[in-house]
Image (cartoon, helix red, strand yellow):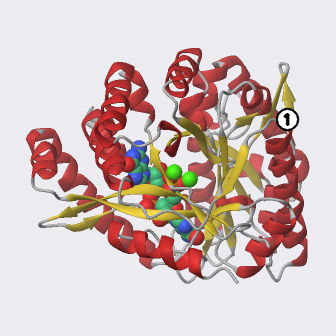
Amino acid sequence: MTKEELIQPVSSLHQDPLSGLVSRIGLESYLETYYKLSPEKKLTLMVVELSRFGSVNESMGAELGNKIIKTISRRLIKIFSDATLIARTHCNHFCLIFDNEINIDEKVELLNDFTQRPLALGGEVIVLTVCTGVAELGALIDSSAHLLHAAEVALHRAKRDGLKHCFYQSHFVSDAKAVHQLENDLRVSLVTNHAELHQAIINDEFKIAYQPIVDAGSHQVHALEALMRWHHPKRGIISPALFIPMAEQIQLMDVLGSWIIRRACMDTISFPANRDGSRPGVSINVSGTQFLNPEILMHSVQQALNESGIEPHRLKLEITESTAFGMKQIDIVNKLRNMGCMIALDDFGTGFSSLTQLIAMPIDYLKLDTSFIRAIGSENSQEDLRSNKLTRAVLSIAKEFNFKPVVEGVETAIQCERLTEYGASLMQGYYFSKPLPLEEACKFIVEFNNQQR
Ligand code: C2E
Ligand code: CA
Ligand code: CA
């Protein structure tokens, strides 16, 4: 059975005009026909998402975005010549179908490998990352209609958990429904009643958890990252990953952003000093939407510095790649640096990193996403080797351009050891400490300093 035989009649609806690959409709029709003809046969579907593709289109233009899609499509066809079908089902989603026995780990490995090779397009060097959801027709999924959905649910789970790929499991759907319900309730309640969020601030429902960023070399605490939590009276603790995107959408992020800047700077006054007398700083996440109203952002920063009296260099503002790249944003970043604050580029490595743009950024710290180091010390020696090589390469870029590297998500002693060996001393992660309430974070500073042998 060939793909041409299955996708009959071939119409323009079955083809994606940009990539020339099969379209979503074509893929759905293939799955339906396939299942009708051979319901007992195995079929594996992989949904691959190019991370943060939207931001590339915005910052570098749709023309470059289209070139990337075409190049990736060609590469997929070449590398996965054994795939039964390759489709583009959404702007930045590709699907691969295999109808024979395959080694999924091998396929995922191939995918990660080929996407990590930089693309030279239109005078830019683009490094991209992908995330993959995998599902198989079989015991867990018994209809073709569910297969695509299941792979997309697995993709969503991989993204949520910061994984490169994830296999579908049956409880994902019920989990996703529960989160969706919470998200929906919260959205309805916030949209219909903007005052709820203001009221929540007044009622002290927002709390800050502080996660240490340590200097593993000197065994002192460099800074504490302020991470927001919402202790909702009815819904329990709500993760920032849920309520921050919502607050951004309904234009409430300025309010929350100003609140955390002022509160965290006041809390910073109580951070104990390190052994050498230096005082840990505070690192605060600034969302992209706060850059749309720079006067509010700059006013909050100035007010927070005045009220708390902390030295401006102790205030570090974390921004993500997608926020950082426009001229207007760079101008705002420069103004914040002129006020004496330090700037960190957060989550480096999770999206499209244009090296040309990176080196032009006025930043002080480069925060390496945990995905770089995740496989360090892994049992899979190939992954271990690649992770080590990649980490070293990024650290040398940081050094070359005078950015202080901070490595996120350090969970094991071996990761800490290797990073130290590669000359990276600023680290953050569960190996040292989870995010803590203020009082415990202050205790951590004292204890960590005392642990120095
Ligand atoms: P982020 O800035 O990348 O923060 C790091 C996240 O990684 C935190 O999740 C932290 O708890 C988690 N983490 C730290 N160490 C480890 C580790 O060793 N292993 C693993 N697996 N995870 C680790 P959290 O607190 O859930 O925050 C999620 C995201 O929400 C943050 O990601 C940040 O983007 C956003 N966020 C939190 N607070 C604020 C805020 O006040 N403003 C804005 N704009 N965003 C915020
Ligand atoms: Ca951060
Ligand atoms: Ca981060």
**Whether residue 352 is visible:** yes
Indicate the quadrant where residue 165 lies.
Answer: bottom right
Q: Nearer the viewer, residue 10 or 350?
A: 350
Q: Nearer the viewer, residue 53 or 397?
A: 397
Disc count in the image? 1
Q: Is mark 1 within 8 Å of ligand 3?
A: no
Indicate the quadrant where residue 227 lies.
Answer: bottom left
Residue at horizontal 20 percent and vertical 53 percent from the top: 186
The residue at which mark 1 appears reads as: 119
Q: Is residue 90 above or below residue 29?
A: above
**Whether residue 160 is visible:** no
Circle 1: is it few (<14), some (14-19), or many (20+) Cα within 10 Å?
some
Q: Is residue 411 above or below residue 36?
A: below
Q: Quadrant of the C terminus?
A: bottom right
Q: Position of residue 412 (x, y in %)?
A: 69, 79
Residue type, mark 1 in image: Leu
